[in-house]
Each structure stands twice: as structure tokens, then as C-alpha cells.
Image (tube, rainbow, N blue to C red):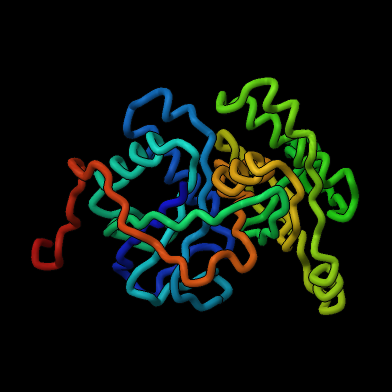
């Protein structure tokens, strides 16, 4: 399930780094810890987008000028979504970068119909290689058009699906079909324009900063429907709980919107107005 969290932007023109997933990851982890539920705190089976709104780019990063900003949070567990939202709305406002955001509401996103062949686009970068403190292995480039690229994503996906306790061993054995095929035309066009589809991004793991390579490009995935549904909801690749590997479908159900999402708002607090200060 994917929910879109709507925030009021209190200080228009404020900004975050262009790639600000690590700031969001710190915020989300802190909110999960705040609730005190050890099971929820220990979960890594979730995914999230970057902040979305009307933006302009500068040397400092992304400046937001819309009155509202959104964040998509996604996980298979409804309990985790409700736990996260309940604790998030316990804050009258939150700070990300130098942005001041006031939680306003939540909408449930439409879930597209998936099959054993789906076309995806990367909302956030795919990560294949775990970084090391002692070398630059996390920056290693792997050609997306090779079997190695697809095989590494397959292995990680199966490990995550098995750890989720949502599938039996027999189910996992039946998910042997898995092939990621990049959009060749897109890759060729990117190269012709001398642009990049693979960049180096910051990652913070246990307060240690690493640099990892992430890939963003459209692709077709051939895999069982259950596998497609799992990665669409929980992300693809490594560090999905740190905001990497979020996908969207290409040309998915145009016109399909969102609907209000209800959750326990007993902890919701209202930010003080200027008159109260």
C-alpha cells in the first residue's frame, strides 16, 4: 500500500539537497523509534519517495515554492503505515533541511494492476552493491544490460521476500523467473546527450557516511506477479528503507487518483500560529 502524506510548507523558498533521501531516512527512523514498538522499530520492509512540490534548482539544492509538499510512504504492512502516521502526526511540525513542514493529511494512492511483465521507471535510484568502509566497492559500475545486473537484484529480492515471512519456501522456489531488461532507446539517448543514468549518492548507515552508485532508468521486468507486487510496494534493490529503489509504472492507469486515508489521529498536534508566538 502507498500513502501520500501532505504537508503545509511554512517557509516558501526553503530547500533540501537535490538528493535528500538520507535526511528523510533519519526522520522516518526517528519517528518509528518515538513510538516505542520494538517490532515496528526493527522493520526495514518499507520504501519512500523524495519530497514533491513546485521546485526550482540552485547550487544549494531544491527550493520549494508550493504551499504544500508531499511524501509517498509505502509498505506491505498496514500496521506499519498506521503506526508511522500516528506518530508522525504527533509532531506539530517537522524540519527537513531548512524546510518547516506541518503534517496536514494523508491520501491512499491507487494500486495499479500488475502482471508477469511490467514496465517501470525509477523514482529513486536502484542500488546493487553494499559499500565498505575500507574501499570503494559501493561505487562499482555494473552494466544494466548484463545478466549480472539482473541477477544481483533477483538475489536481493528473494532474500527480502523470504525475510518478510509472507511467502513459504515453496513460493520462493517458484519465483525463479526474473529478468530486468533496460529500455535500450533511453540508454542510447542518455549517452548521446552525454548525461548520466548512474550516479554516486550519499548513504548514512549507523551514523557512518558511505558513497554508493545508484541507477535511474526505465525498464521492463519479467517476473511472477507476486514478485512484481512486492517490489512495487517495498522497493527494488538495496537500502529501500533508506529511500532507494522506489518504482512507478510507465503509463499506469492515467486519471486514477487518490482517496482519503483514515488512521488514528489521537496524537495529532496543531502547530502554533503566529499569534501564539
Side of 65 relative to 104 (left or right) = right
Side of 247 relative to 200 (left or right) = left
| Residue at image point 43% right, 57% down | 109
Q: Is residue 28 above or below residue 101?
A: above
Which percent across, then down, holds residue 60? 54, 70
Name, please, the residue furthest toward the right: 146
| Residue at image point 27% right, 48% down | 262
| Residue at image point 53% right, 36% down | 45
Q: Is residue 28 above or below residue 166?
A: below
Which percent across, then down, holds residue 119? 70, 59
Classify the position of the C terminus by image quarter: bottom left
Side of 187 relative to 110 (left or right) = right
Side of 85 relative to 212 (left or right) = left
Which percent across, then down, holds residue 198? 77, 59
Camera-side residue of 77 and 35: 77
Q: Is residue 264 above or below residue 105?
A: above
Name, please, the residue furthest toward the top: 169
Camera-side residue of 166 and 269: 166
Q: Quadrant of residue 129?
A: top right
| Residue at image point 73% right, 62% down | 217
Amino acid at each position: 500500500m502507498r500513502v501520500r502524506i501532505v504537508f503545509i510548507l511554512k517557509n516558501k523558498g526553503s530547500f533540501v539537497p537535490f538528493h535528500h533521501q538520507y535526511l528523510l531516512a533519519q526522520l522516518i527512523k526517528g519517528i518509528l523509534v518515538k513510538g516505542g514498538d520494538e517490532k515496528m522499530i526493527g522493520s526495514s520492509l518499507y520504501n519512500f519517495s523524495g519530497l514533491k512540490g513546485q521546485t526550482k534548482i540552485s547550487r544549494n539544492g531544491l527550493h520549494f515554492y508550493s504551499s504544500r509538499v508531499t511524501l509517498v510512504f509505502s509498505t506491505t504492512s498496514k500496521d506499519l503505515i498506521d503506526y508511522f502516521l500516528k506518530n508522525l502526526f504527533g509532531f506539530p511540525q517537522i524540519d527537513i533541511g531548512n524546510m518547516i513542514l506541518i503534517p496536514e493529511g494523508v491520501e491512499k494512492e491507487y494500486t495499479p494492476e500488475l502482471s508477469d511483465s511490467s514496465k517501470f521507471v525509477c523514482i529513486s535510484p536502484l542500488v546493487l552493491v553494499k559499500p565498505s568502509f575500507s574501499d570503494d566497492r559501493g561505487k562499482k559500475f555494473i552494466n544494466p544490460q548484463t545478466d549480472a545486473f539482473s541477477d544481483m537484484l533477483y538475489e536481493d529480492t528473494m532474500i527480502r521476500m523470504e525475510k518478510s515471512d509472507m511467502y513459504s519456501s515453496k513460493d520462493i522456489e517458484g519465483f525463479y523467473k526474473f529478468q530486468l531488461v533496460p529500455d535500450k532507446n533511453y540508454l542510447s539517448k542518455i549517452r548521446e546527450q552525454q548525461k548520466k543514468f548512474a550516479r554516486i549518492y550519499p548513504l548514512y548507515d549507523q551514523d557512518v557516511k558511505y558513497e554508493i552508485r545508484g541507477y535511474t532508468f526505465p525498464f521492463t521486468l519479467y517476473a511472477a506477479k507476486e514478485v512484481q507486487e512486492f517490489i512495487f510496494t517495498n522497493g527494488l534493490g538495496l537500502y529501500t528503507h533508506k529511500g532507494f529503489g522506489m518504482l512507478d509504472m510507465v503509463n499506469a492507469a492515467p486519471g486514477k487518483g487518490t482517496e482519503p486515508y483514515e488512521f488514528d489521529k489521537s496524537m495529532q498536534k496543531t502547530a502554533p500560529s503566529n499569534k501564539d508566538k
